[in-house]
Image: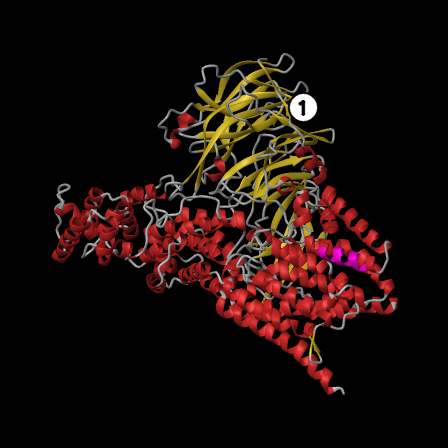
Amino acid sequence: MSLRYHLIYFVGLLFLFSCVSKPNGEFSKNNNPVKIYPDYTEVIIPVNIAPLNFLVEEAGDAYYLSISGEKAGSIAVSSRDGQFRFSEKKWKKLLGENLGAKISYQISVKKEGKWIQYPAFNNTVSSEKVDPFLYYRLLYPGYESWTELSIVQRSLENFKEKTVIQNNVVGQNCVNCHAFNNRNADDFMFHMRGNLGGTYFVEDGDLKKVNLKTKEMNNGAVYPRWHPSGKYVAFSSNKVVQQFHAKENKKIEVSDLNSSLVLYDVDENEIMQVPVDSEKQFMDTYPEWSADGRFLYFCRAAQIAENYDYRDIKYDLYRVAFDPEQRKFSDPELVFNAATLGKSVSFPRIAPAGNVLIFTLHDYGCFSIWHKEADLYSIDLWNLQVNKCGNNSDFTESYHSWSSNSKWLVFSSKRGDGLTARPYISFVDENGVTSKPFVLPQKDPGFYREFVKTFNIPEFAIKDVDLAPGEIRETAGKEAIQAQWATN
Amino acid sequence: MNSVPKKTKAITRFFPAVLLFLFATVFLYRFTDYIFFYQEKSSLFQTGFSFLQQHLERPGGFLEYLGKLQIAFYYYPLVGALIVSTQILLIVWLISGIGKKLGAENFLFAAFLMGALLFYLQTNYQYQAINNLGILVQLLLFVGLIQSKPKSEWRVVILLPVIYFLFGSFSILLLGITTVYFLLQKSWVKPALSWFCFAVFFWIGKEFLFFYTTESLLVFPFSVTTIGGQVVLFGLVILLLLFVPVFVRFRINLIERIKIRQLKLAMFSPYLILALLAVVAFQNIDEKSKHYFHAEKLFYEQKYDELIRYNYDDPTNNKLTLFLNNVALAETGRLADSFFKFRQSDDGSTLFLKWQNVNQFIRLGGYYYYAIGVINEAQRWAYEYKVIYGYTPETLKMLIKTELIKGNYRTAEKYITILDRSLFYKEDARNFRKFLNDDAAVWSDEELGKKKQQDSKLDFFVKSDMPWLNLLPVLDADSNNPMALQYELSWLMLQKDMKGIVELLPALENAGLKKIPKNVEEAVVTYKLLRVGEMPELKQLQIDPETEQRFQRYYQIYQQTRSNKRKAQIALREFADTYWYYVFFN
């Protein structure tokens, strides 16, 4: 029985291999580069990235790909439909053998019985590893309704994906704004809106629910950033409105009617105003800590009046010094004046190395994901020189996050179809210059063409979050711990 | 000797079964085909593994998947009627078979009774395919159990977690009926272990596997909505099914003993049940829903003239039907002309649907925006519907059309791919695909080109809770937009705002109208003859003297009868489709 099984298996394999064709010497050359999807040509990739499966967008009867390493190793793959999916084991080996070197892709397509070879393209294998996990929220890029929302963990070293939180576990309450302390899943938080609402903190593997809103606060806590010490979380507290465009392709306009910054002391369970706007002349939002935790960066616009024009709301980049021991702030100072350029800043994010800050720049407002013109810019924090990043496109580039070694930047981009955001990853050199990005690889190379959900808030992490549905349900059902208001 | 039992069998079993099948098929197809239309238009089955995979994320998802597959075939109502009738017949046959296997030679009364009840439940348009399908599968499994050897019965115990994963709450029916069966056999271990296995798997699933609420893990895919709110009746059917093994053992002797000549009355009970069912089923035909869904069908098919004629011949008070009728009137350029030929609500609810999270409202409300050329908002309503309720054929088509109009071809392609994965909309997908990356093709298409031309020229924030407020900015940007003009005039007529109507006359002229629409002209004549205000100078448009004469006559009768409103209404009935009648009696 066992022999028969093996014989069938062997014949099957033989049949499979006999069907796969490859060029055997004779071929003509085509000097035009072959188009592949997703575009993984000439990108810098981390040594530990999952295989960059792709498909060839050239009609043909058979396809052949040979990847050869500059230093060592090669992979050869045949395909009938132009899809190339690589063995994880062989891929890892090839990348490992070519640290700091190039791997070259040579594609041949068989048309009408003849093989045509296209110009090769390269990837550079960086020895700088990317953090092993990427977290994002999957949702429909919709307007105001939602049913299924999930925060998902994806391994960057393979294609494993797992749900960390899904809103259905608590009856379709909205879950959002997941945030890690220093990309470490040991300190992790997210908000839940609705009847089981609260801010959920993961502390040493335990989940707790906190109600951060006190009677002294006009609005709830919204956009979070952990202080590097893990002792504090800065939030913006926003009153948000959304309106729907009749004509523009951006469809939805999300803006703040007012906003301010608050600081939550995790250990003391206290929340306090960040005292940077005692006269309430400004709308402050999107907090971000400097790598040493001594400065709080944020976006600031003039407080809107009653008959405001949403296109006039321009946010500049500010910062305020912070004494973590005394829990005290100094006076705010302007870092980048976007308004004078007729622009607006959102999502300041500082590299863990502390040298570069990358932000999103767009025409107005603070909700850049619906702004086609939104692009990423970097500021050298030593000389405050601002440069446009090299990884932008004609479509929206918005939310971004740094890897723990400051060498990789993941960001949301809508360059695929203009509607759904996908996570793109760029290498960042020591001068803060970003390389051509590559989209998060998927097992099925045609995945992004059909997937209709959007990847929201991509965040690198170095650890695995393991929340069981029962644990979330149990915590959600409990009374939230009420944060106490503090004046300092 | 043998011919009599054969004949008896034919009379008592075969004929009633055939009758039930024929009656169910004919009734469902001929009298309640709106059930199939409604259900088919409420979901979209997709071929391919990913759609199946989506349904394997939660217990009961597989049954939901099968239900959607079945509903896809409702595209052809006759096929739908045949499937449902076959399912009911199979359930009757299985129950009867269970009875026989457990020792009751004649178990037709209970079998037909349950079949009849299921058929009655099905006559409610909201009663979904998963219910009969779920019951059928559980009965099949139970038959498999009782026909197997005692040793093999353990398989059910072991397989219960799998059955729960595939069929969700419907597996509780199997768990219940097997428990009753085992208990009657005085076996305690098997039911105890069945419940234990079920409970352990449920607990593991709840705590570690499934991101759903405990309640939904217990109940899904069953819901009160998917049985059309018929909780008592459905509960009764489930109870009867659960206790089938008991009924077999303790049959009601009285019914068993009654005989007519040589034949037991119980053997003829199926005929009685069928006769009763026929009477009750005909009484259960929902004429209002039938009318509404027929109107909706004509609307989706863009048979606007037929829809208008249908509503004219068979007037309705249903606001959704009237809303669709008004869109049809607008699309055929007759809204301001024939507006008062149909009942209208003075709050505008027959003209617009305000944004609210109600299935039919979100599904249809966007067609008003599509009609007046606010394509973004039409798309938003379709999109929001998709997010809340999932894909349906018509909302998907609306998403495709609006993306094509906006030139977002990559997104349109994604939706077309989804439509292409349906069973019966592949032709539509093929037709839509022709427009991809081809602006010229979109422009030259009668519908898409017209809408692209009308698409909002001016950006503004849409006020979906006050839909009439969106007409002015649309007209500000393009005063020649004929759809928006018709809607604005109709809204002003509802508001009895004669001044506003008269002020729009130059815009009507600019839009190239040769004649003032009938109802609008009635408003203008009133304004003029009652000297409410100044008339604008018009170059081409003229008031028909006949309309003035009609108003004089109307006014005269009104003056004579106005002391008695009822009397006046009767006297003025011939003017019921006029603006005047609306103004005075609304």
Decide whether residue A61 is among the magenta residues.
no
**Mark 1 = which residue?**
A230
Compared across the picture, whether A171 is left or right of A365 comes to right
Q: Is residue A189 above or below residue B189?
A: above
Give the overall secondary structure of the magenta segment. helix
B232 or A134: nearer the eye? B232
Q: Is residue B333 above or below residue A198?
A: below
Which stretch did the figure color magenta? B173-182
Q: Where's residue A219, x and y in %? A: 51, 25
Circle 1: residue type: Gly
Q: Chain of mark 1?
A: A
Q: Where's residue A288, x and y in %? A: 57, 25
Q: Residue at x 82, y 57 (%)?
A: B183
Note whether residue A113 is visible. no
Note whether residue B359 is visible. yes
Compared across the picture, whether B359 is left or right of A156 comes to left
Helix, strand or loop at mark 1:
loop
Q: Is residue A104 above or below residue A334?
A: below
B287 or B139: nearer the eye? B287
Q: How is the image coloured?
A: secondary structure
- Location of residue A78 (image quadrant): bottom right
Q: Residues within 10 Å of mark 1 (few under 14, many from 20)?
A: some
